[in-house]
Amino acid sequence: MERRRVPYQKILFVCVNQREPHETCCAHRESEAIAAALKARIKALGLSRWVRVSKSGCQDLCAKGPNVMLFPGDLWYHGVTPDDVEQIVQDTVRGLSLPDPSPAASLWSPTG
């Protein structure tokens, strides 16, 4: 076993847990589409080396879902919709240490 530092500055954990059809869960509320949209936006901004979008199992907050957690950053987003993706990306990008000049810097504007 080797131990190393986490290779990403930030990780977005998107719950995609699926329960029975009659049970409440993030997967029944577009969480797979949200995860795909977050990943596509991070990739489009050229930030894949610094930000990881990772699907997670149950975060045990099903009634509040879909759920997305940002680490580090200590942010929990709940009731997320595809329309929230850009705001989550903006929150995630804030505080990244990117090499200068960064292609992402010219693509992303903190004002939206």
Image: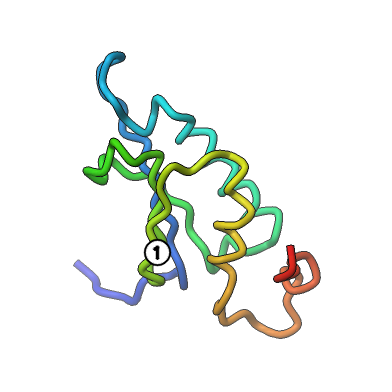
Question: x, y (%) of residue 98?
Answer: 62, 79
- Residue farthest along the left direction in this orientation: 1
The quarter of the image holding the C terminus is: bottom right
The quarter of the image holding the N terminus is: bottom left
Against 29, residue 106 (above or below) is below
- The kind of secondary structure element at disc 1 is strand
- Residue farthest along the right direction in this orientation: 106
Question: x, y (%) of residue 56?
Answer: 33, 45
The residue under the point 40% across, 25% down is 28
In the shown orientation, is residue 60 left or right of residue 35?
A: left
In this orientation, which residue lies closer to the viewer: 73 or 51?
73
In the shown orientation, is residue 50 left or right of residue 11?
A: right
Query: What's the image's color scheme?
Result: rainbow
Question: x, y (%) of residue 16?
Answer: 37, 36
Give the residue at mark 1: 75
In this orientation, which residue lies closer to the viewer: 62 or 18?
62
Against 79, residue 23 (above or below) is above
Query: What amino acid does circle 1 point to?
Result: Leu
Question: x, y (%) of residue 2?
Answer: 24, 71
Against 99, residue 69 (above or below) is above
Locate residue 22: give its quadrant: top left
